[in-house]
Amino acid sequence: MILSQVVAAADNNAIGRNNQLLWSLPNDMKFFKNTTWGMPVIMGRKTYESLGKPLTGRTNIIVTHQQDWKSEGVIVVHDIKEAMASAAKTDAKEAFIIGGGEIYRQTLPITQRVYLTRVHTSMEADTFYPEINEANWELLSQLDFNADEKHAYAYSFQVWQRKM
């Protein structure tokens, strides 16, 4: 199973503030849904709580250190290894890390692919995506989009693959 990360990050790697996204990019939301549909998504508890409910059409795996934490319609695990084992049980070809910052940081060393929406601005934030070291990663594709009436910022869809 391929382990991938899906993230939207500003030029300064900002991804969130006060447990909320920093922008509204409808095309990024469509990209996220289409990319992760039918696959397991792994996220931290705070990311899940910011969503408010399980993502439909996907196996939701929540990582938390709180031993007694529960939520309806999700799989609760207590570390990344347990999350990966739960994702593997789905027989999906790919599992997706969807946040937050700490989960991205912990899993980047074992991630094979990153679907990065690079938002072309710098933002104040309290949560950041780890730096992609281009010595270890190859940019496979990039599609660029300008700001428009629905998207306050220009952005690029990038796919990064770990170098072997």
Image (tube, rainbow, N blue to C red):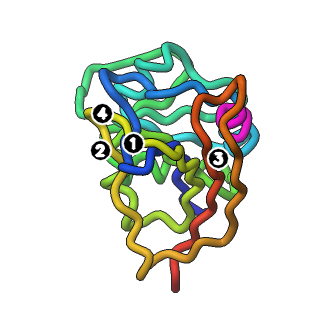
- Find residue 91 and report its horizontal and vertical position in percent: 68, 53
Q: Is residue 122 visible?
A: yes
Q: Is residue 56 above or below residue 61?
A: above
Secondary structure under the numbered disc 4 in the rendered image:
loop
Q: Is residue 109 above or below residue 47?
A: below
Q: Amino acid at mark 4?
A: Ala
Give whichever of 32, 128 is nearer the camera.
128
The answer to whether 53 appears left or right of 30 in the picture is left
Q: Which residue is mark 1?
A: 122
Secondary structure under the numbered disc 3 in the rendered image:
loop
- Please tell me which residue is depicted at 37% across the width and 35% down the height of the picture: 44
**Label 3 vs 2, first from the N-terminus:** 3
Secondary structure under the numbered disc 1 in the rendered image:
loop
Q: Which residue is mark 4?
A: 125
Q: Which residue is mark 2?
A: 102
Q: Amino acid at mark 1?
A: Ser
- Please tell me which residue is depicted at 54% across the width and 50% down the height of the picture: 118
Magenta part, dominant SS: helix
Q: Which mark is residue 90?
A: 3
Give whichever of 55, 157 is nearer the camera.
157
